[in-house]
Each structure stands twice: as C-alpha cells, then as structure tokens.
Amino acid sequence: MRKVKVISYGVGAVGSMTAKFLLEKEGIDIVGAVDVDENKVGKDLGEVLGVEKKLGIKVSDDLDAVLSETDADIAVHTTSSYLRDTYPQIASIVKHGVNVVSTCEELSYPYVSEPELAKKLDALAKKHDVTVLGTGINPGFLMDTLVIMLTAPCQRIEKIEAVRVMDAATRRVPFQKKIGAGLTVEEFQQKIGKKQITGHVGLEQSIAMIAGALAWKLDNILIEHVEPIVAEKPVESKDIKVKTGQAAGLGQKAKGIMKGKEVIVLDFQAYIGAEDEYDAITIKGIPSIKQKIQPCVHGDIGTVAMVVNSIPKVINAPSGLLTMKDLPVPSAAVESMAKYISA
Ligand SMILES: NC(=O)c1ccc[n+]([C@@H]2O[C@H](COP(=O)([O-])OP(=O)(O)OC[C@H]3O[C@@H](n4cnc5c(N)ncnc54)[C@H](OP(=O)(O)O)[C@@H]3O)[C@@H](O)[C@H]2O)c1
C-alpha cells in the first residue's frame, strides 16, 4: 500500500500541531513544508515543530518549487481565514494537480462571502482534477456538519440553535488575547473598532452551509456585533488575570432569517472562567432533538483531527470545490492512512 504524500503549507500554531500529528500517523509522508515567516524559512521542519529529530525537510517560502519537486497528493493549508488572501495560495496548489484541505474559515462555505472566487476555484479544481475542502472544528463541524447530521431523522424543522461555550483559560495564549481577555471594556471596544478583535470567523459560513443542506432559501444572514463577556468576579488563566468588570472574552451571535423568522441561531462564547463548557444543538421540529457535548470539544485538537481525518475523503472525492456537506459522513481515520486510499 502506498503512503499519502502531504505538503504542510503554513507551519504556524495549527499547521505545526497538524504536522506533528501527521508525523505520528502511519501511511503518511510529509514531503514538503511552506511558510513565509522568516523565523522558520530555511530551517529543518523538525526544528520548527520542536520535535527531537531532523526531518530532512527544509521550510521553504517558495511554494511553486516545493510543489514541483515533491509530487504530493495533498496540501494541508493553514495560513489565514479569508479567501481573498488564500485564493492565490490555493490556486497555485491546484494548478500543480495537488488536492487541498484547508482551515481557511471562509473556504468552509465560500458561496456566501466570495461567490465569484468560489466559482473560479471550483472550475480550476475540476480542470486540474483535484478536490479542495475547507474544514476545521468550527466552521467545519460543530456548528454546521454536526447540525446537518442531526437534522437527518427529522420530518419537519422549525428552528435550529447551536451554542458553543468554551473556557478560554484552557486555550493557547494568542487565542486568549484574540478574544480580548483582560482588557477593559473600553479597550475591548477600541480593538473592535480597529478590527484587532474580529470575533469568530465562520458563523455566516456555518449558517449558509446548514441552509444549503436543508434547501432553505434564507432572506438574509445577520451577524451580530461582537460583545465583551464581562467578568462578574476575578478570573484567570495561567497567563492572564481578569479583574471584575473587565472583558473575560467575547460572545457573538448570528442568525439565519427565512420568511421574516429566525430559523437558524448560532451563539459563540469564549471567555476565561466559563464554568460550564459545552456544545449544544437544539432542533425544534418533528421530532425535536437536543444534543449537548460536555465539555465542549477542544478546538485545536478537533481542528487538527478534522483536517487529517478529511485527507482520505478529499483524495477519494470527485474533483471540484467541495464543502463538508458534500463529502461522505465524516469519521476518524484511525488506521494507517494508506488503508483509506483506493489507488
Ligand atoms: N476552521 C476552524 O475550525 C479553524 C480552527 C483553527 C484555526 N483556523 C484558522 O486557520 C488559520 C491558521 O491558524 P493558526 O492559529 O495556525 O494561525 P498562525 O499561527 O498565524 O499561522 C499561520 C502561519 O501561516 C503563515 N503564512 C501566512 N501567510 C502565508 C503565505 N502566504 N504563505 C505561507 N505561509 C503563510 C504565517 O506566517 P506569518 O506569521 O509570518 O504571517 C504563520 O506561520 C487561521 O486563519 C485560523 O483562523 C480555523
């Protein structure tokens, strides 16, 4: 059985965790690594990942050279959130006839925010006979794919709600900073104004993916303002202390409206000190369904798993730009990766 050849494109936080997991997996060979960070370029991937041995793969900032030299099956792409930024990167990979699985949030369902780029990318992927997928834990699973799967036994659906509450104290420090933990409410609002705090990217994509799966024609999708979640008592993580009255993190809601009614409501909350961490989905319909995962699924672990577990499904899928709702039922790929690949 042949091994799956993977290029690691983006060796930041998520890309590094993914590469480390790929190194542990049977049936996978990392054949190239790409990043623009000057602290990483030219170094051995093993050193960048902080693993003990050298891997004999230099991190390069020359994507075309890496693609030309490696004959990869798939690139794991983890550079940024917006398709306008990632389109040229993904298009280059596709032009080399290499499949893509990416954590770019907008790519998870790009037809809402970037319909033209989505169309172009789909045509390009078909022309080069490869598959492109955007996935992750959220968007990619908890507030869309899982919701869609839970609608399968329903005869009627009136309304869907999905809530994710996470204690940011258990997450990476850059994440805690990204959600404004430890800022005064005024500082928080200023950072919102300067777009230094952007809220959760992906709510719009998740709502559109659910609506797409249910063939619901929404009037519109409302993305509400990002709000600080204010600490009612002092709370802290290992690195950040939050005083009473300061922002412990953020909350954001988004709503899918159909015929004037809220039919899909997503509620994302991430803050230091959340006592009850959960992912909850409520479907009001026939039958009504309630599902609660406690504690909430760990975002980093889940994202890495979603990306890696999607690799065989992406390689085996028809060509084009696909979303999670187009692939077979998602599942873990716990055996040697080679077992899941047909050729
Ligand atoms: N869907 C989901 O559930 C999910 C979950 C987690 C993360 N994400 C998304 O995945 C992306 C990666 O997350 P992260 O935390 O790993 O971010 P990160 O730590 O900033 O890592 C991104 C890495 O890619 C590099 N990079 C940026 N532009 C590049 C380019 N044009 N070519 C090559 N490398 C480039 C960055 O270098 P510089 O630092 O020099 O720019 C950095 O090393 C983010 O957009 C994040 O929001 C999605």
Image (tube, rainbow, N blue to C red):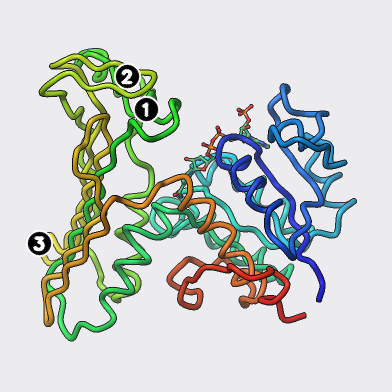
- In the image, 327 versus 16, the foreground residue is 16
85, above or below 192, in the image: below
Q: Residue at x 80, y 47 (%)?
A: 32
Count numbered badges in the picture.
Answer: 3
Image spot of residue 230 (x, y percent): 15, 25
Earlier-in-chain disc, 1 versus 2 = 1
Q: Label 1 to label 2, Cα distance in Å?
A: 14 Å
Nearest to the eye among marks 1 and 2: give it. Answer: 1
The amino acid on which the numbered mark 3 sits, given as a three-letter code, is: Gly
Residue at 24% from the left image edge and 17% from the top image edge? 242
**Local crowd size for mark 3, using a 10 Å CA cut-off: few (<14), some (14–19), many (≥20):** few
Quadrant position of ligand 1: top right
Q: Earlier in the sequence, mark 3 or mark 2?
A: 2
In the image, residue 139 above or below residue 78: below
Residue wearing tag 2: 191
Image coords of residue 307 (percent x, y) = 56, 57
From the top left corner, tell me how far across and down residue 310 is, in percent.
57, 65
Between circles 3 and 2, the one closer to the viewer is: 2
How far is mark 1 from mark 3, CA to CA? 36 Å
Q: Amino acid at mark 1?
A: Gln
Q: Neighbour class for label 2 at 10 Å: few (<14), some, many (≥20)? A: some
Mark 2: which amino acid?
Answer: Lys
Q: Secondary structure at mark 2?
A: helix
Mark 1 highlights which residue? 176
Residue 324, compared with residue 265, is above or below; it is: below
Say which quarter of the image contains residue 224.
top left
Q: Which residue is mark 3?
A: 260
Question: SS of the residue at dot 3?
Answer: loop
